[in-house]
């Protein structure tokens, strides 16, 4: 008879407890192993996280030349959505043109296109990860990703820049001094620069395989800036990094191939500077002064003042041995700047010019291209100035793009190569997150008109004060009104007709009449002593586009009009007549207030005008398409229905009316009908 191992009372013996413990331990190990395997081969698996396309199509580098002087036309354009990831401040979209390709970088990943055609070449994205930096050197490109919600999960990925082929991956590394505005960090000589967690050590890693090549401790007490706008930059043979040191910041230049410190210079404040590198020139803007250093670290030029560069680095290029910088000297008027060329390395000023507040500069083939946010204050498109490096002489042409330099996400950017000019700018959020738009421009048809107007003759521009007839104004209950025409000029071309016309009820001008009387008593009957005033003229809306010829400065400025009464056939509400015979029981509609009609642009063809209007609406946060206005296209801007932009053929017009609600739409309908009659 075999005895039972179970003790009396149903208790398990020692052997049973051991087996139970081993079973629990085995179960726990199995669960842990499954968790590890799931994390490694499922959660971290490349097969579902990564969207990676490559190309085998060859591509040739572009020549270093931009488009010739004259009008510009669009070759191709692309929009890229911004990515608002978990790390605040790194939601930019940045661009680069190199080796015949355009690289577009955002938190979503990398998109690389053919620079000539805009066709896709290769791309790389990781689901659940955000791209927070990138570097390029020679034919290698390296991207830095962090896992969303787990910043400790870091990944460097190396690519062949031409094919997009994956070369290597390395976990745990972090790049050195990433710029928030461009997401770029320094690299050169096939080496990318990384740092440790405390940002006190600099390491050079091979862009070929990610292996370490050298390591260097930063000067005592100093560390790299983190989360700065643009704390570093690099060329192939030199990298410059801003250091956060006790007392004030410093600028450190190293050889990326060996890690050897080339020079180390103090700056003027303890704030994070912005750093920009050109070929043999390093610029640093520290909020106190803009400093220019030569290849050996010698400072050869400085522009002092708190507002010299404003919130961003001053646009600059190196052309024909001269450093050309656009900056704001003390006392500069809003919208203005100064362009100055200094010899390298002597620092001698070759020339200086007062210019518009350029948003970006680029150079190619000895030509300097300067980007104006507006061709002229009242006109819609951006402008490009072609500046001679020898003496600063300038020619101007419109760019078929719209630009709002104050929108976040994309700092206005420009580059020139292969006979093309590349311009990038932000488009407005929401929808849902905003985006960046890149436009590639080529030289356009000369046309029969001046280049400053895109080849369109001055006679092709309608008179803004002729787009509403007296019947249109009577319908808006503006039986007694005054007009304020405003003219515009571009370069040496002055448009013959007003580009903007403001209508005000007669009663609203009583204060203005009193002001003119006060001017006469002060001995200034023309009012020219007042800012923004100009000689007066009577302007009658209607079929005729004739406007008195007045001598005025070649800038956008108003012309003070007189009451639109009597000779215009309008009824005077102070006298008996048809205009005063209104039903007593009906409550009169309110008079339109703040009415302005502006001709924003006349393009050389309807397609160009349509793209400009599309770009205009893309820079507005609140936009509604209106299909009841007439014409070819119309949009309503803003929280109220007070602004309507419309296109009829080649002409873009904007109508503003403060009140009553809906007045702008009714008047825009009349303007559209009038433009169709004139076309």
Image (tube, rainbow, N blue to C red):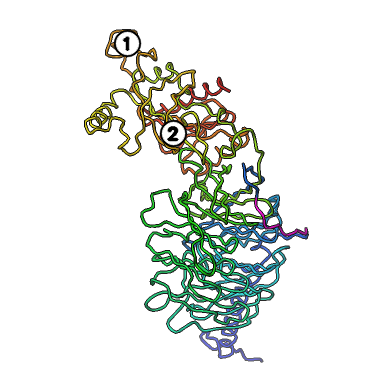
Q: Residues within 10 Å of mark 2 (few under 14, many from 20)?
A: many
Determine if residue 77 is in view.
yes
Relative to residue 48, is residue 518 drawn left or right?
left
| Residue corresponding to mark 2 | 643
Q: Which mark is residue 582?
A: 1
Q: Main secondary structure of the magenta part?
A: loop
Q: Is residue 44 above or below residue 388?
A: below
Circle 1 sits in a helix, a strand or a loop, which is it?
loop
Q: Is residue 670 above or below residue 551?
A: above
Determine if the magenta segment contains residue 13.
no
Where residue 225 appears, as percent x and y from the top left, is 46, 72
Q: Is 504 or 560 nearer to us in this picture?
A: 560
Where residue 445 appears, as percent x and y from the top left, is 67, 39
Where residue 435 appears, as percent x and y from the top left, is 54, 50
Determine if residue 85 is in view.
no
Which contiguous range is marked in magenta?
A: 57-66
Residue occupying the point 33% across, 19% down:
480
Q: How many marks?
A: 2
Residues at marks 2 and 1 touching, judged by CB atoms closer than 8 Å = no
Q: Is 616 or 55 nearer to us in this picture?
A: 616
Q: Is residue 415 above or below residue 617?
A: below
Q: Is 482 or 352 nearer to us in this picture?
A: 352
Circle 2 sits in a helix, a strand or a loop, which is it?
strand
């Amino acid at each position: 008879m075999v005895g039972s191992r179970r003790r009396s009372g149903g208790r398990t013996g020692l052997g049973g407890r051991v087996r139970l413990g081993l079973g629990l331990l085995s179960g726990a190990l199995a669960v842990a192993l499954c968790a590890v395997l799931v994390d490694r081969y499922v959660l971290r698996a490349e097969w579902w996280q990564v969207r990676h396309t490559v190309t085998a199509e060859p591509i040739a580098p572009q020549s270093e030349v931009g488009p010739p002087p004259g009008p510009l036309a669009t070759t191709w354009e692309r929009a890229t959505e911004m990515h608002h990831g978990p790390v605040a401040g790194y939601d930019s979209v940045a661009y680069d043109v190199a080796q015949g390709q355009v690289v577009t970088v955002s938190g979503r990943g990398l998109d690389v296109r053919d620079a000539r055609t805009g066709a896709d070449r290769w791309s790389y994205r990781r689901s659940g990860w955000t791209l927070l930096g990138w570097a390029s050197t020679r034919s290698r490109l390296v991207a830095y990703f962090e896992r969303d919600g787990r910043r400790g999960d870091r990944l460097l990925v190396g690519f062949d820049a031409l094919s997009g082929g994956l070369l290597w991956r390395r976990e745990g590394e972090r790049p050195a001094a990433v710029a928030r505005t461009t997401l770029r960090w320094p690299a050169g000589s096939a080496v990318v620069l990384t740092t440790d967690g405390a940002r006190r050590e600099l390491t050079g890693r091979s862009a070929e395989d990610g292996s370490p090549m050298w390591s260097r401790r930063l000067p005592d007490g100093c560390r790299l800036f983190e989360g700065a706008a643009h704390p570093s930059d690099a060329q192939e043979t030199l990298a410059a990094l801003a250091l956060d040191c006790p007392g004030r910041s410093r600028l450190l230049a190293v050889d990326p191939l060996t890690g050897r410190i080339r020079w180390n210079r103090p700056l003027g404040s303890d704030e994070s500077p912005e750093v920009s590198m050109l070929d043999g020139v390093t610029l640093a803007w520290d909020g106190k002064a803009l400093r220019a250093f030569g290849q050996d670290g010698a400072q050869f030029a400085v522009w002092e003042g708190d507002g010299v560069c404003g919130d961003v680095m001053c646009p600059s290029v190196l052309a024909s041995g001269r450093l050309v910088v656009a900056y704001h000297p003390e006392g500069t008027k809003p919208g203005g700047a100064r362009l100055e060329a200094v010899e390298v390395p002597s620092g001698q000023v070759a020339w200086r010019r007062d210019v518009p507040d350029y948003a970006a500069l680029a150079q190619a083939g000895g030509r300097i291209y300067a980007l104006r946010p507006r061709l002229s204050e009242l006109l819609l498109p951006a402008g490009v100035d072609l500046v001679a490096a020898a003496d600063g002489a300038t020619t101007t042409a419109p760019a078929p793009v719209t630009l709002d330099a104050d929108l976040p996400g994309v700092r206005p950017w420009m580059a020139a190569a292969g006979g093309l000019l590349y311009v990038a700018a932000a488009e407005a959020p929401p929808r849902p997150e905003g985006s960046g738009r890149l436009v590639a421009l080529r030289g356009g048809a000369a046309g029969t008109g001046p280049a400053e107007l895109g080849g369109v003759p001055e006679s092709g521009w309608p008179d803004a004060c002729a787009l509403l007839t007296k019947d249109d104004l009577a319908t808006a209950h503006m039986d007694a009104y005054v007009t304020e025409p405003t003219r515009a000029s571009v370069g040496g071309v002055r448009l013959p007709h007003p580009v903007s016309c403001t209508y005000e009820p007669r009663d609203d001008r009583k204060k203005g009449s009193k002001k003119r009387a006060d001017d006469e008593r002060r001995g200034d009957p023309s009012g020219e002593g007042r800012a923004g005033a100009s000689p007066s003229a009577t302007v009658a809306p209607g079929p005729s586009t004739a406007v008195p010829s007045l001598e005025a400065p070649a800038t956008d400025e108003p012309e003070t009009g007189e009451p639109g009464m009597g000779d215009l056939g309008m009824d005077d509400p102070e006298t008996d007549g048809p205009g005063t015979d209104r039903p007593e029981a009906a409550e009169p509609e309110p008079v339109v207030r703040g009415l302005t009609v502006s001709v924003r642009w006349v393009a050389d063809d309807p397609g160009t005008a349509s793209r400009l209007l599309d770009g205009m609406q893309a820079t507005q946060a609140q936009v509604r398409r209106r299909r009841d206005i007439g014409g070819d296209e119309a949009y309503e801007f803003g929280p109220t229905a007070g602004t309507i932009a419309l296109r009829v053929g080649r002409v873009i017009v904007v109508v503003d009316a403060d009140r009553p609600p809906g007045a702008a739409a009714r008047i825009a309908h009349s303007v559209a009908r009038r433009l169709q009659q004139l076309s």
